[in-house]
Amino acid sequence: MPLEVRMKADGTPRRVWYGRYEVNGKRFCDKLDVKFAGTPPVPFSLRAEGDGAYERSRAAAQAKLDSLVADSRIKHDSARLVEKLYEIKTGEQIQSVKLAELPEEWTKIPRKRTPDGRYAGQCRSTLARFATFVQAHNAQADELGHVTRQTARAFMEAEAARGVTSKTWNDTLKLCRASCKYLLPAGSINPFTGIPPRDTETVFRKPFTPEELKAIVDAALDDDFARPILITGICTAMRRGDCCLLKWSDVDLTRRFITVKTAKTGATVAIPIFPMLYDELVRHTRTADGYVFPDQAAMYEENPDGITWRVRKVFAAAGFKDAEEASETDPDGGEATATAAALLSQTNGDENDPTAPAAIGGEIHAKRKGGLRRASVRDFHSFRVTWVTLALTAGVPLELVQKVTGHKTAEVVLKHYYQPGREEFRRAFQSAMPKLLTNGSKTPKEQMLEILDATTAKTWKKDAERLRALVAAL
């Protein structure tokens, strides 16, 4: 158990003592917080004697080192005793997870369902980054049990400094906390306990209008790869992966129903087959138990981003693209379809004209306060938002909508998927509320015409005021 003196760049000793020791086969070198005092021997050697002040400081450092070694051995013996008691009680040895093996050990945690390959890869990457962070801040920490609360908080602060969104930050916290819960020995203190989650900023996806859906379908008419999965997503509210991996065994064309177990939640959903989807399905050759769309399934399993690119290509042809992409040509040198171009031309109409058709097109990303990337507001998942919004606005009971989407709680559906525009919101309430409040569910245009038809020489001033009020409310 030798003492150690470290030298500065100029060859003079640092003014503090260090101590080297070994416990359970592991070597340590710690600063002893005992000041180096007096005049050391010349030439300098720990075996030689210096003046009185130097020898007193060396004796104090040696005493501090002896105490440190004794405490370390006591802690090790206590830990070993706990391990022995656990082994006697359970018949199993306490397994200590190495930080370098943390990502691989995470994959071995028992689960009801095997996680998606992409999600699992993201989790392993995050845990590897955590392990690297811990070892960079404490070279002696090589096991998960060596992680302190201070280190855990420092890692989460470093994640925030990377500029990730609050949701990503919370997901990282949840992952690390759960990993420690399952991989630390029984009775250990979880270093991530007590770290509160952050308030999140939700950027909701925008639903498509029926006119926008038509523009998208028309833009995909000649695209035999993208059209089948786009129509499936529009008609069923299924997620991208479930559409691509749909099997014939889940499709009942006779009764016109799709019954499928969703990949994300494992819920079994029953979805009626609309005529547009039926016409698409009968185009494809049915196999005993194969994929309905085999080419799309192969791409999704090999490269899901390829599906995203093909969908965005159709969106761009229908007029949905970010501002910086507006001047770019189509990747294949093509142009928007005639229908999409016609619909896009409507954006030049009078914005103040209530009878003007709604504009088609818009950006597919939106800025947010924090995060490394912009939020996606129009993508394949927007079909799911659109389906829910159109169904609920049309009066379909929420319970039936949940049977299609597979959501267990109404809160998730209403918060994240029901996104009506102001006009749809107004129409839904106007058709549902009593006539006393809605004037018989008449539209503003119908009310105006009714006022004009009933106007007389005696009532024209009062009728004019009523018309101005209706116009101002538009």
Image (cartoon, rainbow, N blue to C red):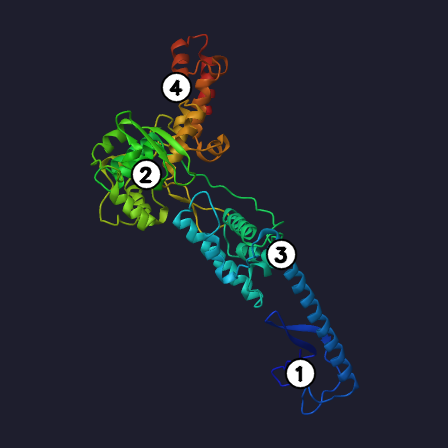
Q: Residue furthest right?
A: 52
Disc nearer the start of the sequence (1/3): 1
Type of the residue with mark 2: Cys
Residue carrying label 3: 149
Which one is in front, 167 or 150? 150
For the N terminus, the image quarter is bottom right
Name the secondary structure under disc 4.
Answer: helix
Where 192 sits versus 268, above or below? below
Residue carrying label 2: 243
Say the numbered circle drawn on residue 445: 4
Say the numbered circle drawn on residue 13: 1
Q: Residues within 10 Å of mark 1 (few under 14, many from 20)?
A: some
The x, y position of residue 187, in whole percent, is 63, 52
User: Mark 1 or 3, which is nearer the eye?
Assistant: 3
The x, y position of residue 27, in whole percent, is 60, 73
User: Mark 2 or 1, which is nearer the eye?
Assistant: 2
Name the secondary structure under disc 2.
Answer: helix
Q: Tell me if 187 is positioned left or right of 364 in this view.
A: right
